[in-house]
Image: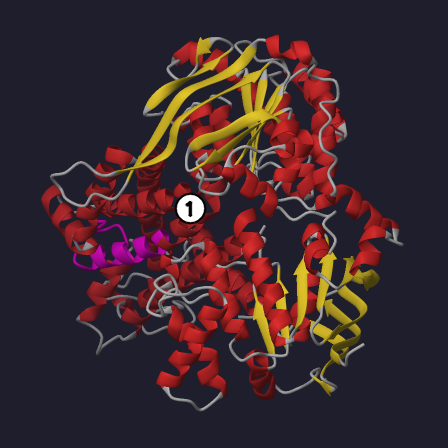
Amino acid sequence: MSDSLLDIDDLSVVIGANQLVKTLSLEVHTGEIVGLVGASGSGKSLTALAIMQLLPESAVTTGLVRLRGEALSGKPEALMQQIRGRDIGMVFQEPMTALNPLMRIGDQVGETLRLHQNISALAAKRAAREALDLVGLTGEIGSLDRYPYELSGGERQRVAIAMAAIMSPPLLIADEPTTALDVITQAQVLSLLQQLVRTRNMGLLLVTHDLAIMAQLADRVAVMRQGEIIEQGDAEQVLRHPRHAYTAALLAAAALKPHAGAGRIDQSGDRAPAVLQVVDIVRDFPRKRRSLWRAAPRLRAVDHVSLQVRSGETVGLVGQSGSGKSSLLKVILALESSQGGKVRLLGEDFSSARGAQLHRLRRAIQGVFQDPYGSFDPKWSVERVIGEPFFLLNAQPAAAERRRKIGTMLEQVGLSASDARRLPHEFSGGERQRIAIARALITEPAVIVFDEAVSALDVLLRQQILDLLAQLAKRLNVAYLFVSHDLHVIRAIADRVYVMQHGRIVEEGPTERIFASPRHAYTQALIAAAPKLQAMR
Amino acid sequence: MSPWSRNMNLRAGALLTLFFLITALLAYFWTPYDPRALSIIEKLQPPNPHHWFGTDQLGRDVLSLIMVGAQTSVGVASLSVIIGMCVGVPLGLLAAARRGAIDELLMRGNDVIFAFPALLMAILITAALGPGAVNAIVAIGIFNIPVFARVTRAGALPLWTRDYALAARVAGKGPMRISSEHILPNLLGVLAVQGTIQFSLGVIAEAGLAYVGLSAQPPTPSWGRMLNEAQTLTALAPSLAFFPGCAVLLFVLGLNLLGEGLRRGAERPT
């Protein structure tokens, strides 16, 4: 084995009364990719910051961090500044905020170099050009004069990687570098990182919650839980034959079983009545006017989309961010009006319904949204939150009846009736999503729309919520329209899938068929780009 | 700022504010002397054991005058804040809920009011309607309206993008109901802070109007008019200007500290 590049020995981080990282030891060798994996809140990012000595002053660190044998712990800030960028490069999660919006990308990439070496502006420019070429931003696209806002998320992340790699630091730390990107861009950025490490013989510490990324990229894997590394070793070894039960649980949850249909929809299911029919919907957004006299140009977010959801069926809608999924959902929920087409709910025209008819139809469709933290009024008790859709009933149930129904619903989603009096902030992310589901179910709708409902959850919670949804669907015979950018999730829950690109449906079919033999080039690209646990190198 | 000193600001502000509110209340039941009783023999006394703050040119007890003057200050400032809130908050909620043309109309109307210097317009209004406490309240109140409308709208807009506002719409609730059930309750903290700050501005504005003779009329005591009357006598009896000046200063300081403390408290992540 080659020399140890980064050597972490017995690292502990204490903030306030909480020990967030516990006696962590980890090594990264030259030319090696080490994955640090764990659920959110397990202390992964803190570890990365501790290596760079970038923790807030209130944090107390003990233990030793060494880079090529030289201790970083306790080094004065001035010396650390020389080391950062030159010896350790870092790539952060959020490409939107990692770049200075007012600086041209060429200057930004060259800045690291000029800080560390006394070189001319011209030389820095030349080096920036090389670095951008290296990360695949060549020609017009990678022009040094562009500003971050002119770049897409994936391009920005490439710039961030160029910044981190320009000094050819022996060690690169990447903290969830692809979490904010869609699958296709993610695959490109990951292969770029991999190629950098191989060609330049760097060490890479890759922090992520996604085990599938580990399976594709990492040489060694360390699994973190509650601040501790509970298992580490050869990636192949850890991911195929996990020794620790927690690793096994993570793996099981990440390897979502493809949905078998679960006997819910038999062949005759095709004849089940359609509860939701979306016919030829067009949704335009006005763009900024160029001239006072000409009509504002329009941006077509949804372009003649038709789909249907049958009674008791789970339909998946998959597409990248910006493909128009969310705009379509708002039209389906009759929250925004469309510029063409109509939405039929239970056979009635929902999109043009008004007054009492709209009120009555709303009962049949409810929604669960992405952000488990933003979806409840922080001042409302759980009971009030779940009871809000009772507003749709003509005769709102009396207090006792109401409480009984809410209690039953809480138990249905795996919480207890006594939780009704508590406030949303007392619950964890997974529990909140259960509350959101309870709220959607309380009026016994025929169809529920899920907008990226499990995207903010880590793998274990995601598994639990998907299981719960499958159970509820069977028990209550409710149909789901499940929108996600995550193919694994769609595959695990949907009976039928629609694939959306640039506002159009490009392919639809039964889940198994779509995944086994995708016909449209975009579907094929999506499926090929998704990281796979099985794809062990 | 350390948590300790932040806490101290809040406490000091609350104590000062409370002190003046209690003083104003107490003055309804008891003052050391009758603030309207003239006693020319005892005029222009410096502070002494009988008259702690001295007496004015008509021999009235300055401490008693300041205590009763606090009633005018608190009354005018609080009523003008109430006017501003009662009109401004619904306008702000409406603008945020409806957006589009209504929003434009309301906010541009606000801009028009904002465009005039507040105190100058207050002088104009009281000059047109005649001087007096009630007209001062109306004048200051009108200028509180756009402030509250703007703060409410700015606070409400991000709340409308939250998923819970979306969920309420899916539950069939209209914009007005969502505004009152979800938006307004979550803005109360912000509004309390702004209310405190506007209150302190109201105290200053009242003192200013009274100083030029456009607020409460004699014989109703008022800090601003006391300052005005003291002006010609500063050489003879400097304490006459000192005490009402201090009263304005300390009350406004207290309110500002309180507002600042509340704001920092409201900023704490929940």
Q: Residue B159, how many percent across, how many down?
A: 45, 41
Badge 1 is on which residue?
A: B191
Residue A419, image quadrant? top right
Residue A153 in magenta stretch: no
Where's the N terminus of chain A, which quadrant? bottom right
Number of numbered discs: 1
Q: Residue at x 78, y 62 (%)?
A: A222
Question: Residue A315 placed where, x, y %?
Answer: 59, 25
Chain name for mark 1: B
Looking at the picture, tell me which residue is in the foreground, A143 or A535. A535
Residue A205, image x and y in percent? Answer: 68, 68
What segment carries the magenta color? B198-222
Q: Is the residue B105 above or below the residue A304 in the image?
A: below
SS under mark 1? helix
Front in this rendered view, residue B81 or A109:
A109
Can residue A377 be seen here? The reply is yes
- For the question of whether residue B4 can be seen, the reply is no
**Crowd class of label 1 (few under 14; some 14 to 19; many from 20; radius 10 Å):** some
Find residue A119 and report its image quarter: bottom left
In front of the other: A350 or A108: A108
Residue drawn at the location 54% of the way across and 48% of the way down = A184
Which corner quadrant holds the C terminus of chain A?
bottom right
Q: Position of residue A88 (x, y in %)?
A: 61, 77
Q: Is residue A30 left or right of residue B149?
A: right
Q: Amino acid at mark 1?
A: Leu
Q: Is residue B84 above or below residue A64?
A: above
| Residue extending furthest toward the bottom | A118
Q: What residue is rendered at 26% in x and 75% in y?
A: B237
On screen, residue A231 versus residue B15, left or right, reads: right
